[in-house]
Image (cartoon, rainbow, N blue to C red):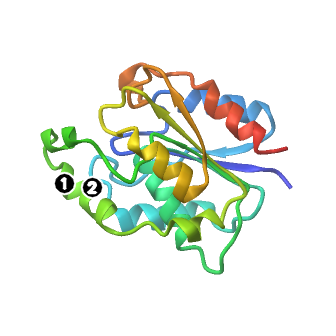
Amino acid sequence: MQKRVFIIHGWGGFPEEGWFPWLRKELVDRGFLVTVPPMPDASHPNKEQWISFLAEQVGHCDGDTYFIGHSLGCQTILRYLQRQLPPVKVGGAVLVAGFETVTGRIDQVEGAHEVLDPWLTEDIHWEMIRGRSRKFVAIFSDNDRWVPLSNVKIFDEKLGAETIVLHDKKHFSGDDGITVLPEVLDALIAMQS
């Protein structure tokens, strides 16, 4: 069966942003079926809408299903896995700039609390999610203006993720000039073995 990969962008993102086109091509060239869905109303992401939309996009998932998320896309993937009934164990997930907490700089963004509070106030059931994927890799930047490095410990201890901290990648977005991210490709390929 062909392995499927779903790449989920974050708040304000879109399928052709930053490193997503490069990664999609690299994965397709290696025989993966890749979907990079445009998440609904990306400038005002609604938690319930995003989780439901991802579930519709994925349909049946199994050990040949993999996820790659960026920022709020990571939250979407984690909460999607949390809600899977009956529970399913997917092949793996690579989470780039994922978070449970954000920096105080978010207070400077108009409407940020309206968007983020529903995501940040509902508990993430880490132990449940941990059992729903064969492997998690979480990638962070040492100068991310939105995601503090305290999340490294959270993803390591609570999710059992392999954590990677990269230098000077900011928030890994297209606005930050990140158009290639080989660490994500390497992490996903390594999950195959």
Query: Is residue 136 or residue 3 the one in the foreground?
Result: 136
- The residue lying at 45 percent from left, 40 percent from top is 97
Label 2, on which residue? 116
Q: Is residue 50 above or below residue 12?
A: below
- The residue lying at 68 percent from left, 37 percent from top is 187
- The residue lying at 73 percent from left, 57 percent from top is 134
Which corner quadrant of the image does residue 145 belong to?
top left
* Residue 165 x %, y %: 52, 31
Which corner quadrant of the image does residue 114 belong to?
bottom left
Which corner quadrant of the image does residue 160 belong to?
bottom right
Relative to 90, is 30 on the left or the right?
right
Quarter the C terminus occupies: top right
- The residue lying at 69 percent from left, 65 percent from top is 61
> For the residue labelled by badge 1, is the local secondary structure a helix, a strand or a loop?
helix
Can I make out residue 9 in this image? Answer: no
Query: Is residue 34 or residue 10 the one in the foreground?
Result: 10
CB within 8 Å, label 2 to label 1 = yes
Q: Is residue 52 above or below residue 189?
A: below
> For the residue labelled by badge 2, is the local secondary structure a helix, a strand or a loop?
helix
Quarter the N terminus occupies: bottom right
Q: Is residue 17 above or below residue 84?
A: above
Can I make out residue 67 in this image? Answer: yes
Classify mark 1: residues with Cα within 10 Å, few (<14), some (14-19) or many (20+): few
* Residue 170 x %, y %: 38, 26
Relative to 104, is 119 on the left or the right?
right
Q: How many angstroms separate mark 2 from mark 1 (CA)?
A: 5 Å
Label 1, on which residue? 113
Identified by mark 2, the residue type is Leu
Identified by mark 1, the residue type is His
